[in-house]
Amino acid sequence: MKLLAALLFLSPLTHAKDVYDYILIGGGTSSLVLASRLSANPSTTVLILEAGPILDGEAETQLLIPGYIGATGFRYDWNITSVPMASLNNRTTAISTGRIVGGGTAVNGMFFDRASARDYDNWATLTADAGWGWNSLFQCFRKSTTFRAPAPESNITYDASAYGTGPVNAGYPPYILPFTRPLRAALVALGIATPIEGAAGKAVGAFWIPNSIDTRTMTRSYAKNAYYDPVRQRANLRLRTGAVVTRILFRGRTAAGVEYASGPNAPVQKAWARREVILSAGAVHSPRLLQLSGIGDARHLRSVGIKPLVDLPGVGSNLQDHAVLGLVYNSSSPPPMPAAEALALYNKNLTGPYTASSGNFAAFLALDTFSNRTSSLLRAAAADDATYLEADTHPHVAAGWRRQKSLLLATHDSADAAAAEFVTALASLQRPLSRGYVRIASASPWDKPRVDWRSLTHPLDLQILVDAARFVRRYSGAGETWPGAGVQSDADWEKAARERAGPTFAHPSCTTPMGRREEGGVVDSELRVYGVKGLRVVDAGVMPVVPATHLSASVYAVAERAAEVILGRREGGCSV
């Protein structure tokens, strides 16, 4: 049989008979890490199936120039919109889900930071596995990243020892956005600490943040050019684009392969896995595919006409993100350099505004740094046993939420992890107690899922975001045009938040969480899906609780750790 499988791989592809050791669903961030690491053994065959395109050469330029962030709009996105969210006055919001080789790292804002050690130690607590704690993951962060120091005259502080010699380049552009130094000065004037480096486990205070940028070329460093391009010529690695996976195939309760097609009217094709199918489709599409394949809350599966294979109610529950609220000010900044002039400067000598993406500075602050009612808020939240989850939430999911709540309240009560992020006039909630969901709308793989963040359904989230917005007012000075000086009371602020807050900072996560099955867990600490064999999930969905950071660096670390586990190195950390 081994000889037959080898012949099938080496022969001209007849897609109905494709056989590989590993099939990776999705060609995004975590998938490309795994593809690089798993295919390092020439005898291990790997297939990547990605719904979107791969961009090379001139076409890739639109992604690589940092100043072009956002220019592609939703061209490389799944274009999913949330359901009307009752907690946000029935507003809807676009959901950021990359549909391109490289995933979110191809189109994100290029912030490349990490949370505090405590955030990851919370993962270790919830999984009962020290391999997911800071001391272990720090090695994985270092393994994924090479840091290139900024010029001394920039006066940017850093600690190079927090980084390693990995595929993703991190650094600072020569052009620092104009708001940056005034923001830093305003925060320092309020007594906010300014640590030298935020990536070494103490990400609390106001600090410089690198971008995922190769400063030798001043271009975006992302999963495709960091992990895939250097190994794309391997004979044992195949990438198929335009391949929408529609279902995972099982023999009994063992994942055996997948079905995929280029569109709803295209022929369905199959590929088979000798060892494992690995879901790396992101926090929206991984739970969607599990549900389409019969794994999820049996009540919901039956309601859409799918026969349950495994009753696993945590699938698609526990959706988290970083809700954001921005104040609006009249700007007194000088007008920006004309775009044509800035682009010419970039093309000539790799300097100027087009080397900058979304910024290089932010404040991540503990709750009692910006709120004067920390004790009363936490006491009220601890005493209130209401879940604020949906009325029909499965008892396993509710039990997991209660355990998370206890841990998160203790974290809020400490000074060693952030409760909110502040950048320009934006405040972002970092540790929500509200929980949303991702659910298939029908048994058709071509129907978009129903997504509701349910942001600010828990009163503590709303109260913390209000206090964070008040803090923005403190450091931003005069010229506020929204919500305006007339908004002062808690009630007025809460009304304003429900009218304007966004549920997402493009960080959807936690929908296939690690944890105990009886507490809503979907995967164990080795990322194996409960109730079946040969199937793992590796993406932002496996995070039990969202960390206080932008997520791309953490997803790289999760994927590096997953590769170690899959390859049998389970003792923790990441090998060099």
Image (cartoon, grey):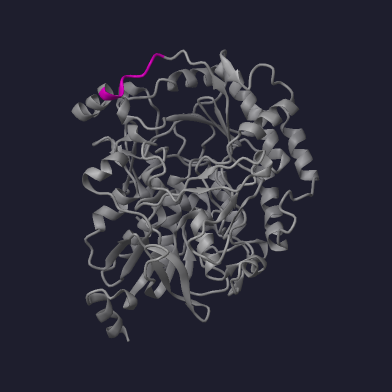
Nearer to me, 19 or 431: 19
Which quadrant holds the C terminus?
bottom left
Q: Residue at x 49, y 53 (%)?
A: 540
* Depicted 233 relative to depicted 471: above or below: below
Q: Is residue 380 visible?
A: yes
Residue 207 highlighted magenta (yes or no): no
Q: Quadrant of residue 344?
A: top left
Image spot of residue 46 (x, y percent):
33, 67
Q: Residue at x 25, y 58 (%)?
A: 231
Q: Quadrant of residue 65?
A: top left
Query: What is the residue that sits farthest to the front in this orientation?
Result: 265
Image spot of residue 55 (x, y percent):
28, 49
Q: Residue at x 62, y 29 (%)?
A: 468
* Depicted 45 relative to depicted 330: above or below: below
Residue range (magenta): 334-340
Image spot of residue 234 (x, y percent):
23, 63
Q: Residue at x 46, y 64 (%)?
A: 570
Query: What is the residue that sits farthest to the bottom in this orientation?
Result: 1
Q: Quadrant of residue 474?
A: top right
